[in-house]
Amino acid sequence: VITNYEKNCYVGLGNTIEIALHKCFGLSTSSPPLDVISEGVGELSLVIDTEVAKKACQEVLQKVKLLKGEGQSTLVTTKPGLVNGTGHIGSSDRDSRRLCTSQKIGEEEAPSDTVKSARRRQNNNSSKQSWLLRLFESKLFDISMAISYLYNSKEPGVQAYIGNRLFSFRYEDVDFYLPQLLNMYIHMDEDVGDAIKPYVVHRCRQSINFSLQCAWLLGAYSSDMHISTQRHSRGTKLRKVILSDELKPAGQRARREALQPPPPCHHGQGMGEHGLSPSKRTHQRSKSDATVTISLSSNLKRTASNPKVESSQDEVSTSVIAGPVRLTPQREFIKSLMGIGKRLATLPTKEQKTQRLISELSLLNHKLPARVWLPTAAFDHHVVRVPHTQAVVLNSKDKAPYLIYVEVLDCENFETSSVPVRIPETRIRSTRSVENLPDCGITPDQRASSFSTVPNYDNDDEAWSVDDIGELQVELPEIHTNSCDNISQFSVDSITSQESKEPIFIAAGDIRRRLSEQLAHTPTTFKKDPEDPSAVALKEPWQEKVRRIREASPYGHLPNWRLLSVIVKCGDDLRQELLAFQVLKQLQSIWEQERVPLWIKPYKILVISSDSGMIEPVVNAVSIHQVKKQSQLSLLDYFLQEHGNYTTEAFLTAQRNFVQSCAGYCLICYLLQVKDRHNGNILLDSEGHIIHIDFGFILSSSPRNLGFETSAFKLTNEFVDVMGGQDGDMFNYYKMLMLQGLIAARKHMEKVIQIVEIMQQGSQLPCFHGSSTIRNLKERFHMSLTEEQLQVLVEQMVDGSMRSITTKLYDGFQYLTNGIM
Amino acid sequence: MSGCDAMAQEKKAGLLRRTSSSKKPLKEKVVLMYDEIFTKDDPAKTNPRFWDELFLMKVNLEYLEGKLESLDGDEVMVVKDNINSLFHHCVLALEEEHQIKVVNALQTLCALFRGVHQKNKSATGFDIINMLVGFDKAELRMKDLMESLDSLLCGDGSESLKSLCLKLLLCLVTVTDNISQNTILEYVMINSIFEAILQIVSDVSSRGQHGYDAVVLLALLVNYRKYESVNPYIVKLSIVDDEPTLDGLGMVVHQALTEYNRQYKNKEEENHGGFFSTLTSMVGNMFIADTEEKLSVQTNEAILLALYEAVHLNRNFITVLAQSHPEIEMTAAPVTPIPTTPTSLGTTPPSLDMMHNPELPLDPNLQTSNLLITFLKYSSIVMQDTKDEHRLNSARLCLIILTCIAEDQYADAFLHDDNMNFRVNLHRMPMRHRKKAADKTIPSRPLVCAVLDLMVEFIVTHMMKEFPMDLYMRCVQIIHKLICYQKKCRIRLHYTWRELWSALINLLKFLLSNETTLLAKHNIFQLALQVVSLFNMFITYGDTFLPTPSSYDELYYEIVRMHQVFDNLYCMVLRVSTNVGQWKEPASKVTYALVNVRAIINHFNPKIESYAAVNHISQLSEDQVLEVVRSNYDTLTLKLQDGLDQFERYSEQPKETAFFKELVRSISVNVRKNVSLNTLSQDVLLKEFSSIS
């Protein structure tokens, strides 16, 4: 049975034909209208042939005319025929899914609404069927096109159809455009909103993560509205619905209602204030511990008589039954991270900030593990611990962004997998005393013979005696266990010598030599600088850090242990960063598709509100400012120091990486007009890539309007030196990469423009300042130029940037104002 | 004169009271009722509502206690049933809804416990139980009592009521000087209130109001027959692993120690401020002794004992030490309720707001602090002056706690954590030959530096006639344990080791110059051996933990520079070890340990002399000596000593038992004193409940 609603959709589709046709013809004359490139259909021309399209439309029109007289019912029956005709969407399961979703929608939406719109559509029914439908149903129709039509089409029918069609795309694909979808939902007319809503609601029911992402984005993108309209806006309403947790999975909701509404204070693992009632946890814990002890020693039968123990049993059972409130733990987690950022901002010195950060995080640790996760991660996991002493405050003048490392255990599904059990901090250490650790190769027997002074232990000694986990987790720095002339050898000898009584001699010179050698062997690390606490932390190789933290963690022995990191930004608007991320990501996939070896690193952005969010840090990378300050070398010399001499493969690889990333980011900087390009905002990773960060000034906005940075992008002599100078092959390669990159980007311009254009809706962001943002952006793709002309353009831009005094000036300016080299 | 007046007045008052109480019509009703209890007959016989009415009366503690004390042997047997009955009804009244009755019952119980014990100081615990509760019913009654107290402590009732419950328990726990002789506590063992104590400590608001009493109570209960039997409080405390609870415990200790530090600082400022400071600077340091006298703020061993027990018994508590809290001392209100003052009901520490507020305050001037830092500061204050017995005990306990900390792997890990840097302002004794270091210049360093500083500070400031031998031993052992950890984990601490070396050499010098007086009391060879072993650690394992090659050179420089001390020490130990006597063996051990130091001296001295001769320099500069040292390593052979990186693990039994028994005794006496003052004043309480009822 096809529901009324769906029928309306198809009927409505007919209305679009005029506009669609017009559009089709209009577009075909100018630029590639539809980027219908897709693997497997390579022979299809990029531009839909006008004649073919016309023909197809006429055919459809004919068909529809024939059918018209037979009324609505026949139309319904022909519908499958139409679908089959396009040779697409045959699979019945998807149809049925769409069916049931629309049924669900029917339940949720006010039915009168659908009826009303149906009538409206019927009234101006032109009964023309569209080639558009064929396009929509074709393989070529991807999410990018769907978004584009949703945005550009004024036809409710098309919009509603696409809204339905969203269900057929892969989640990851739609997720990429979530900011666009939600921004349209908030700022565009009712029909677009109605088209999008069912999909969003459906996905919210399925996933907590999606729910929260939506809620955060809805909040952030509604924030530019006037406060009075904002309160009653569609976006705010939907946000409220999501956050009130009404959008539970249907099944769960039913089950929940069947049960007695559980008292909210019993959700055991929650981050919420009730979930953490310490006394309750105490009782649970000490109870279980007490039982163990009782079974171990009969002396403690007394404990059992304690009424507390029995009463706590009920608590345990209730907390098992009541599931955790769905969204609360994660929201609380994010809230506490943001709270920390807010409080840090009030402290004047980096040192105080760092200390406070560490102490706040250690308090946060008490609440972990919990059903919380980092939304920037690509896999399902539960956060189990924040190694608080590793956290660092990042360089910022007045805000307090900070970077934390987060230990997680990966899991099947963070919503359903059980939250890991807490392991106390001290569990890692096997014993309380140093002497009990297997030290430097001395076997217990040896120790016993050499060391017999241990007197009777306290009677409570068994309480902490030996711990199996601890036994496995002996922490000995790996590096030092290999060499045979190591001092540990002497310890063993010293033990054996006691039996043989033969003295061991060592040369003082050897000790002194080992000392200087060992210090020389440590890899190039940065020195500690209280004014720049993050430099050391960021310089440490990621793998090294992971190993170190894993060793020190009570969870480190678990096979599914992972380390993540995240930058918490509080007081910063990350919406522009998110926009930049999307554009970078889009260009990255365009270049990949067109096989241009440009290298860029889009890093994930999580917008939580219009003034807070999280950033996925780029690992193994430090800013060029930090590189120069710490090494006191030129960039080229630093490359030579880190990677080896000119002719080594390591250097050449690093150089190639540098060139490919430079070319990529120069294009990005040009296309997006990224400003504020000082060395603190450009990272250098351990493979030689540069990575631009901080997209606070893009498109129409630039810092303080000082008129600096007029060049297309930043290209300093130092950069050119690393590339091997202006006359080198690598420099030519660099320019060639830029040209290829620009040509490829131009080919898919619409895909890039679309991202930006939709986000401009209703936005007050500085990057959209003025009326010509999109036009200017389009112009920078230079659609009208030939490839030869483009090449000249690239040459000009490179020349201009190199000769640019403003870049140098800007660096000088930054050095004066922010101490950035 | 005024003293005489006061005494006379007191006497007068006493007389007045006695006369008034002898006049029957002026007697309070409650006193009359008490009198009825102290007869042979059951008071309920004549008045069936006797017990109901009794608990509605305001308690007259003095009278009741006095009455109990004045009973003689035969009378006791006569009124025993009535006393048992009173006890029974007290326990029953605890379950009353009428809060006044509960309050009065609690106070009456207090008086009963105290009065009966006062009366029967020599009696066995069993006699006391019999007299109070009656043998046959004791188990049941005490179970009921403990359960009632437990539910009052854990319930949502009035805070004053909870406070009173804790007072009663403190009173019960401290009625005897020696806690282990207090047989009634056996029932407190069986009917554990451990969970109630933890709950108080873990809850933010109750911790603020009752945390201090709860923690002291716990510390005392843990010490009940600690060495003789299994104490469930010990076992339970050792397995607590809930952070908020442990953290709460730490907060209470932190708060109390902070308060002490603050008071000390205030006094110090008082004494150094104003005309006094100008005066002192004028007449030089004549008044230093005087100032110190004034600076002695009463130490708080009870809370320190609690800290010790937590650190020693509970391995999870170690994490709490590093748990940062913003410096509380700066914002604390200038109230001084520790130890308990008679004016306030609770022994509540100040700055309640701080504890109430789960969010950390936003004062940018606050330095983040943690329990360990506060404890180190506290230690630096109490260690300054160890003449007074309380302070000596406190200092000893501080060092014992530090010993436990230094032995703990996790503690060592955060002590040495390069990412956790703090500025720790330790208090330094004002001394003639050195200036007070400006506080601001202290760099931010890993915490272990502060521990080492504290040890160095102790070493250089306690070389006196009343030589605190055992404190010195502990001190040097703590350093040794820390260095063992550094060696094992290859931690290269950027510490000015030179200060430590010179402090240790000066200590040896002091031992040498006071050999005869010291030997009369102490085995100084043991200490000398420890010190020399430390040097051996640096000499033979320096490559594993020294921060730079030049620091190794400096070590040699320091030894060569102070060679006279080592020479003299060698002569002395050689002399003693060749004689027959009790010191023969310990002295010969030192002789053996000195091998490397002497090898260094004998190797480098001639080299330095010849360098001076060749270059015609009479006095070599430090750089020149270091140059000689650097170029002559290769011809020097050292001998590896055995077991340098081994140490004896801290163990309370049997070595420290006597100390702890004595300490607990003194704490008990102190707590009892404060509690008795407190419970007598009930005005606040009654005011509160009269408005309720």
Image: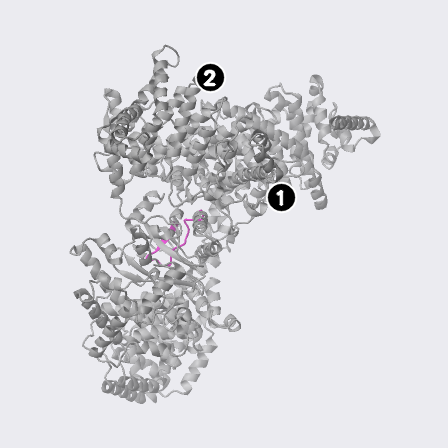
Q: Is residue A207 visible?
A: no
Name the foreground residue: A706 vs B60: A706
Q: Earlier in the sequence, mark 1 or mark 2?
A: 1
- Left or right of residue A281: residue A814: left
Toward the top, the furthest residue is B580
Name the foreground residue: B603 vs B296: B603
Name the foreground residue: A228 vs A775: A775
Question: Where does the image place residue B43, in percent across and percent down from the top left?
Answer: 75, 28
For label 1, the residue is: B157
**Which structural element holds mark 1?**
loop
**Residue drawn at (35%, 45%) of the image:** A555
For label 2, the residue is: B517
* Residue A380 located within the stretch drawn in magenta: yes
Mark 1 falls within which chain?
A: B
**Which structural element holds mark 2?**
helix
Q: Which residues are magenta?
A: A366-384
Quarter location, residue B62: top right
Q: Is residue A21 above or below residue B66?
A: below
- Left or right of residue B485: residue A746: left
* Residue B592 located within the stretch drawn in magenta: no
Question: Where does the image place residue B585, in percent across and percent down from the top left?
Answer: 35, 15
* Amino acid at circle 1: Gly
